[in-house]
Image (cartoon, rainbow, N blue to C red):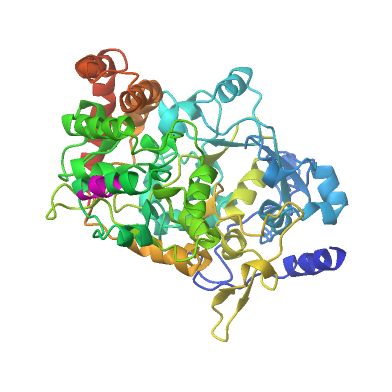
Amino acid sequence: MKERTKKLLSLLSVTTMCVGLLAGCGGADPQQSSASDSVQESTSQDTGSSADASNASSETPAEPEEFTYPMEHVKLTINFGQENDEWGSISAEEAFSDPDKYLMGAIGVLSQASGAYVETNGVSWDSRNEEFTYMLIAHDLPDIMVNCFNKSYKGGPAAAIDEGYIIDLNQHPEWMPNYLAYLEENPDVKSQVTTDDGRIWGFAGVEDQSYIYKDRGIILRKDILDELEMEVPTTIDEFEAVLRAVKAKYPNMVPLSSEMRWLHQQYMFGCLSNAYQSAYPFYCVDGQNVQFAMYDDNYKEFLQRLNQWWEDGLIDADFPSIGKGGVRGKLATGDLFAGVQGADNSATSANSCEIEGAEFLAIPALKMQESDKIYNFCLTDMKMINDYTFSVSTSCENVEAAMRYLDFCYTEEGQTLYSFGLEGLSYTRDAQGNIQLLPEEERWKDEKGNGLAKRTMWAGEAIGGMMYMSDIQKEFVDVYIQFDEYAGINVPMNDEESGIYGAYFADLDSYAQEKLVGLVLGTESFDDWETIKATCKDTYRADEVLAALQSAYTRNMNLK
């Protein structure tokens, strides 16, 4: 461990050359505005300012020094929940005094390279969480606030600035040159982190666009299908016929399983509800009109079908409680015929299955008729930020350090570390300078098994995701990414739209989730469908949420 640590530290001291990885950074010497000397832990917002203000008017100002990383042992706090697998219990003081402990996977690598160590305060990043609300009320804010102000805060990000929780980053453009360059090259992202009056409220986290939300769907046992002498199903009627045949011939095998949360999260069940041209919660299949699933009788028919499958034993009896490990395990042990899950989990099932002759097959989303389209309900053709964004709080005493740390994630070196880890320990380069990942078993991992590439839930944009996939995972993804049109409605909202959405959607979503789960499991009656619709409208302001989403969708689509 000591030798590997020394190697890692030496590699961190070398600037990673990664030409062309981050649009807008302009090569290995990214644009840098004037800045102060390296930021010290004990300094305040005007870090590094050595000139006496009283003499400023009588002296010729010196040329500012070019800013370089790393900073000098800056400590920052952040609300990132209890992420023990990633964070451990190490303090900033321990990290700076004992580099061996500092090497704690991707966050440690980013911290060492930037010179800022971040400690979590244990509070969730979800703005809808009670502990997040209490943190705001007490104004006990970390330096960096991870949040979803644009999705679930009353008044949206503009209100969060006006109410004194986060700063307008535009006050200090010289401390985020790389981020500003990125935003200019990615106007879709810029529009999502900028208020109507031009204030930038956060550093975006952007998932890998090559496959994000295109890598999930139905996985089934092709060998069982062959034994039944049935064709690969393409319509929902054909799929149901297969499930019933499996139940009849293999009574000990579960026909279909999934985590129940996928019924209402991330449009995962869109691979089934596509047959009804609907998906929870909102979607647009005609390119014009945004629809709410709980208003749509097509979606009601889909839920009725799921309820019938549940009553007939076609859906796993463990559906209300099973987790992703349970679904993966049942596929691997032969106890399950078909599952709805991500391609990574399906690959794990296939790779761990020891059943002789077992063959796994990913199939496209189901249709009602062969001529129908397959929609991606998650996305539009715009580059979208994650629900979590990184803002600098008004309580931060070292604003420059916080902004420099987050800006580092938009440098070429930062994006390389974020996406791939460290050369020699995570990847190598070929003769043309292209990154080649080391075999997984050869990549550096800390004592908790964490690698050196963060890749998700952080500031910056991840790239190169397909490189991490096994051949079988790529095979599955290649099936799932085949769709005809986008039906997503996740587009940038202005301050008014964001304010309405943030004020009402969380409560509406909680109510709707409860009801749709109850309808599928039979604890709610479809006779009450109209009452449920009316409650969504009258109590939970669904019309206002829908109108805000429609306004945002229409405006953004008209700009294209």
**For residue 190: magenta?**
no
Q: Residue at x 70, y 55 (%)?
A: 449
Q: Quadrant of residue 402?
A: top right
Examine the rendering and report whether any part of residue 424 can be seen.
Answer: yes
- Residue 388 vs 542, above or below: the answer is below
Q: Quadrant of residue 35?
A: bottom right
Question: Seen in the image, is 290 located left or right of residue 51?
Answer: left
Q: Quadrant of the N terminus?
A: bottom right
Q: Quadrant of residue 256?
A: top left
- Residue 452 vs 540, above or below: the answer is below
Q: Which residue is drawn at 61% across and 73% down?
A: 17
Could you say which is closer to the camera, residue 155 or residue 358? Answer: 358
Could you say which is closer to the camera, residue 332 or residue 169? Answer: 332
Could you say which is closer to the camera, residue 55 or residue 107? Answer: 107
Q: Main secondary structure of the magenta part?
A: helix
Residue 484: x and y in percent read 21, 57
Question: Seen in the image, is 466 located left or right of residue 13?
Answer: left
Q: Residue at x 80, y 43 (%)?
A: 90
Residue 357: x and y in percent read 45, 66
Residue 220: x and y in percent read 37, 55
Could you say which is closer to the camera, residue 174 or residue 187? Answer: 187
> As drawn, which residue projects farthest toward the bottom?
431
Magenta-colored span: 238-243
Examine the rendering and report whether any part of residue 57 can be seen.
Answer: no
- Residue 342 vs 393, above or below: the answer is below
Question: Seen in the image, is 544 located left or right of residue 131?
Answer: left
Residue 183: x and y in percent read 44, 53
